[in-house]
Image (cartoon, rainbow, N blue to C red):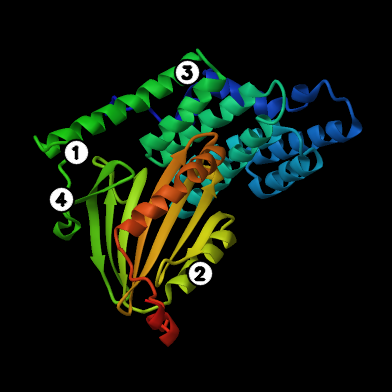
C-alpha cells in the first residue's frame, strides 16, 4: 500500500543514506577528530579515539558499552559541542528503533535523553565562535523529533525556525519548515470551520457569566471549569488556544482548605525557587491579601513562564487568581525576565483591582476636653 505521507526521518536515513541529514550524521559519527583538527592536544586526540570506539560499539548493537565510552569522551573534552550533537543524534535514531520494536516507554526515555544532549550542544555551540552551523543542526534535529516522534507541529516549527536562522537558505530546513507550516495552516482552517461564524474576539461579559474576561488588554475565553474536594477552578485563555496549549492564562481558584494569603504566597515562592525559578516580588496587603511574582524556565523546551498570583481572604475562604504569560524561543529566559520586570507591577494591580479588599481601620483618636473648649 502506498502513502503520500513523508516517511520518518530515521526511515529516510536507512533507505537513502546519501541524503543531506544522513550524510551529516555519518560525518558526525565517523569523523569527530576532524572537527577539532585545529587542536592537536593529547586530551582531545584521546577523546576522539574514545568516541570513535564508543560509536563503533553503538553501531554494532552494544548500546550500553558504546554509550559509556561516548559519555567518557564528552566528559574529557567538555568544550566540544559536536560530541554532544553526535550523541544526541545516535540517541534519536535509537529511540526510533525502540518505537519500531514496540518499546514505547523505553523509546520515550531515549528520546528525552536525545533532546537533552542536543539542547546542551546548542547552548555550548552558541557560546563559541564559528559554531552557528552546529547550533543550527541541533535545532533541526530537535524539530525532527518534535515532528515525527512527538507529533507536535507547533514545537517543531519553533525549532525549524531557529535552525533556519542559523543556516539560512538551506533547502532541507526550508522544506521541513514548509511541511510543518502547511500542517499548522490546515489545522487552523479546520478549527475555523468547526467554529463556524463565531467572532474570534467576543465582547466581554461579566465574570459571573463565565464566558470571558479582559486582562492586560486581551480578552480571554473560558477554556475549562473543574471542581473537586480541593479546589474549584476556572481557566481562561486567548481565543484559538486551549488549556494545554496557551500563551496567556488567567485562572480563578476557590480553595476548599483555608490558608492565610501571606503563607500561601510564601509556599508558592518557595516551590518556584526549588524548581530553579526566579522570584521577583512578594508583597503582603492591602488588607488580608498577598501577591507573588515569579518566573520558571524550561530550557529543554525553550520556554519560560511568568506567573503573577494575587491571594485574597474572602470571609474565611482563600481565593487565588493567577495571570501567566509564556515566552518561547532561543532567548526565552532574557525576554521573559525583561517583560516581567517591565510589567509585573501593572499586572499585580489589575488582579488586585478585581477584588477590592477591606482595609484595616484604625481606632478614632479621642478628642480632649481642651480641644473642645478651643473650638
Distance of label 1 from label 4 (alpha carbons): 12 Å
The label shown at residue 82 is none
Dot 4 or dot 3, earlier in sequence: 3
| Mark 3 lies on residue | 172
Q: Secondary structure at mark 3?
A: helix
Dot 1 or dot 2, earlier in sequence: 1
- Report whether residue 101 is seen: no
Q: Nearer the viewer, residue 28 or 214?
A: 214
Quadrant of the drawing holding the C terminus: bottom left
Distance of label 4 from label 3 (alpha carbons): 48 Å
Distance of label 1 from label 2 (alpha carbons): 36 Å
Tell me the mark number nearer the camera, choosing from 3 and 2: 2
Distance of label 1 from label 3 (alpha carbons): 38 Å
User: Is 277 situated left or right of 291 in this image?
Assistant: right
Q: Secondary structure at mark 2?
A: helix
Residue found 41% across the figure and 46% down from its top: 325
User: Is 353 situated left or right of 327 in this image?
Assistant: left
Dot 4 or dot 2, earlier in sequence: 4
The label shown at residue 205 is 4
Amino acid at each position: 500500500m502506498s502513502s503520500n505521507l513523508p516517511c520518518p526521518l530515521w526511515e529516510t536515513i536507512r533507505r537513502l543514506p546519501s541524503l543531506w541529514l544522513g550524510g551529516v550524521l555519518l560525518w558526525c559519527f565517523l569523523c569527530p577528530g576532524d572537527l577539532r583538527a585545529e587542536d592537536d592536544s593529547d586530551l582531545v586526540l584521546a577523546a576522539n579515539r574514545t568516541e570513535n570506539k564508543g560509536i563503533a560499539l553503538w553501531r554494532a548493537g552494544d548500546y550500553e558499552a558504546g554509550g559509556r565510552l561516548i559519555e567518557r569522551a564528552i566528559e574529557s573534552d567538555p568544550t566540544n559541542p559536536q560530541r554532544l550533537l553526535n550523541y544526541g543524534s545516535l540517541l534519536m535514531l535509537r529511540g526510533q528503533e525502540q518505537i519500531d520494536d514496540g518499546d514505547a516507554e523505553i523509546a520515550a526515555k531515549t528520546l528525552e535523553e536525545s533532546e537533552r544532549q542536543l539542547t546542551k550542544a546548542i547552548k555550548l555551540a552558541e557560546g563559541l565562535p564559528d559554531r552557528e552551523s552546529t547550533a543550527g543542526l541541533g535545532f533541526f534535529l530537535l524539530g525532527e523529533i518534535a515532528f515525527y516522534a512527538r507529533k507536535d507541529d507547533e514545537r517543531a516549527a519553533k525549532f525549524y525556525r531557529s535552525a533556519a536562522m542559523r543556516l539560512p537558505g538551506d533547502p532541507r530546513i526550508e522544506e521541513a519548515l514548509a511541511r510543518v507550516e502547511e500542517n499548522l495552516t490546515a489545522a487552523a482552517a479546520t478549527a475555523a470551520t468547526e467554529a463556524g461564524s463565531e467572532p474570534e474576539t467576543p465582547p466581554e461579559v461579566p465574570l459571573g457569566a463565565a464566558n470571558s474576561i479582559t486582562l492586560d488588554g486581551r480578552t480571554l475565553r473560558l477554556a475549562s471549569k473543574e471542581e473537586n474536594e480541593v479546589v474549584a477552578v476556572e481557566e481562561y485563555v486567548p481565543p484559538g488556544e486551549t488549556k494545554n496549549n496557551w500563551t496567556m492564562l488567567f485562572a480563578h481558584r476557590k480553595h476548599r482548605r483555608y490558608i492565610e494569603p501571606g503563607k500561601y504566597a510564601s509556599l508558592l515562592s518557595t516551590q518556584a525557587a526549588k524548581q530553579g525559578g526566579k522570584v521577583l516580588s512578594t508583597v503582603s496587603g492591602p488588607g488580608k491579601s498577598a501577591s507573588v511574582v515569579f518566573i520558571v524556565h524550561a530550557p529543554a523546551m525553550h520556554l519560560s513562564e511568568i506567573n503573577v498570583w494575587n491571594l485574597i481572604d474572602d470571609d474565611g475562604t482563600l481565593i487565588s487568581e493567577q495571570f501567566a504569560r509564556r515566552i518561547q524561543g532561543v532567548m526565552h529566559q532574557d525576554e521573559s525576565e525583561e517583560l516581567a520586570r517591565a510589567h509585573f507591577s501593572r499586572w499585580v494591580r489589575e488582579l488586585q483591582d478585581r477584588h477590592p479588599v477591606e482595609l484595616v481601620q484604625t481606632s478614632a483618636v479621642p478628642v480632649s476636653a481642651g480641644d473642645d473648649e478651643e473650638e
